Image (tube, rainbow, N blue to C red):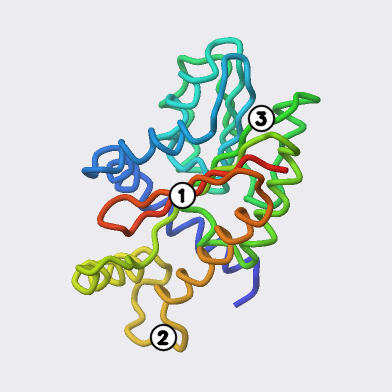
């Protein structure tokens, strides 16, 4: 399968399930609190500019806007059109929240932010979809620059003592949310591949940061790492 065909397949898959993902993103117990913690970790102030990579249906955007106020700017980036439409609908009341189509490594910042400095960047449940998550984190850190903040929130297998049944459920969720969902056997198990990508991304953010905050949520499955860049 070519890269373009793979991209089209992923867009069709995530677009088809946009409504369900929106419900999960906003209503799953524990997830709204997690999103607030991730937004808090961005250390935003009134008037700041914040970018969310992979904004999805826009569940984080109102919370980010609340922190930067009407004087700030919120930019949401995603590559799936049906998902972006839901994000636009959910933020239509705000004139300083902008949603643009792009992927996590080549995003149209200039068209939205102009020459504005970016004070923080948030990426929730994104790095597992990237071929080179550590490289993407490097790009995001370079975009934000010294003293800015980059925050990652991702789901991976839990290390807690009660992890085995939770990890079994997690594996099933990963398989069902990874297109195509009809495969039963994999040469490289999706949940193990996801673990490696998330470990690489969070490790790189720690390496690039002068100050680091780490948290775990949802039975140890969700990891949040916030870094103030050097």
For residue 57, which numbered disc appears in the image?
none
Disc 2 versus disc 1: distance between alpha carbons? Answer: 32 Å
**Eye-nearest disc, 3 or 1:** 1
Cα distance between the residues tagged 3 and 2:
40 Å
Residue that protrudes farthest toward the front in the picture: 211
Within 10 Å of disc 3 (Cα), the crowding (few <14, some 14-19, many 20+) is many
Q: Please state the horizontal and vertical placement of residue 25, each as a whole percent of the image.
A: 33, 43
Please tell me in which quadrant of the rendered image residue 222 appears. bottom left
Q: Of the numbered discs in the image, which one, if any, rests on residue 214?
A: 1
Name the one closer to the observer, 221 or 102: 221
| Residue found at x 55% / y 58% | 202
Mark 2 crowd level (few <14, some 14–19, many ≥20, 10 Å Cα): few
Q: Which label number is shown at residue 119?
A: 3
Between 26 and 225, the one nearer to me in the picture: 225
Q: Quadrant of the C terminus?
A: top right
Q: Where 178 sits versus 75, above or below?
A: below
Instruction: Please state, as top left, top right, bottom left or bottom right, where the N terminus lies in the image.
Output: bottom right
Left-right relation of 215 to 4:
left
- In the drawing, does residue 171 fall left or right of residue 91? left
Measured as percent of width and height from the top left, residue 86 is found at 42, 34
Look at 43% across and 76% down and name the residue there.
Answer: 192
Q: Position of residue 182 (x, y in %)?
A: 34, 76
SS category of the residue bearing label 2: loop
How many other residues sit within 10 Å of disc 1, few (<14), some (14-19) or many (≥20)?
A: some
Quickly name the residue at label 2: 186
What residue is rendered at 63% in x and 21% in y? Answer: 48
Determine the secondary structure under disc 3: loop
């Amino acid at each position: 399968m070519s890269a373009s065909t793979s991209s089209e397949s992923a867009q069709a898959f995530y677009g088809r399930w946009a409504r369900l993902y929106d419900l999960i993103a906003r209503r799953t117990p524990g997830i709204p609190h997690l999103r607030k913690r991730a937004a808090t970790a961005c250390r935003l102030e009134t008037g700041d500019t914040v970018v969310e990579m992979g904004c999805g249906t826009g569940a984080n955007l109102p919370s980010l806007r609340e922190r930067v106020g009407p004087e700030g700017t919120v930019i949401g980036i995603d590559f799936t059109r049906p998902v972006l439409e839901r994000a636009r609908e959910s933020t239509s009341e705000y004139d300083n929240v902008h949603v643009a189509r792009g992927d996590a490594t080549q995003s149209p910042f200039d068209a939205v932010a102009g020459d504005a400095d970016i004070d923080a960047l948030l990426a929730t449940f994104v790095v597992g979809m990237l071929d080179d998550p550590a490289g993407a984190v490097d790009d995001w850190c370079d975009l934000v620059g010294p003293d800015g903040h980059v925050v990652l929130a991702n789901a991976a297998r839990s290390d807690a003592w009660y992890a085995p049944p939770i990890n079994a459920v997690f594996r099933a969720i990963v398989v069902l949310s990874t297109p195509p969902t009809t495969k039963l056997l994999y040469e490289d198990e999706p949940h193990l591949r996801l673990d490696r990508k998330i470990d690489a991304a969070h490790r790189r953010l720690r390496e690039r940061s002068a100050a680091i905050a780490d948290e775990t949520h949802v039975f140890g499955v969700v990891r949040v790492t916030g870094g103030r860049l050097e």
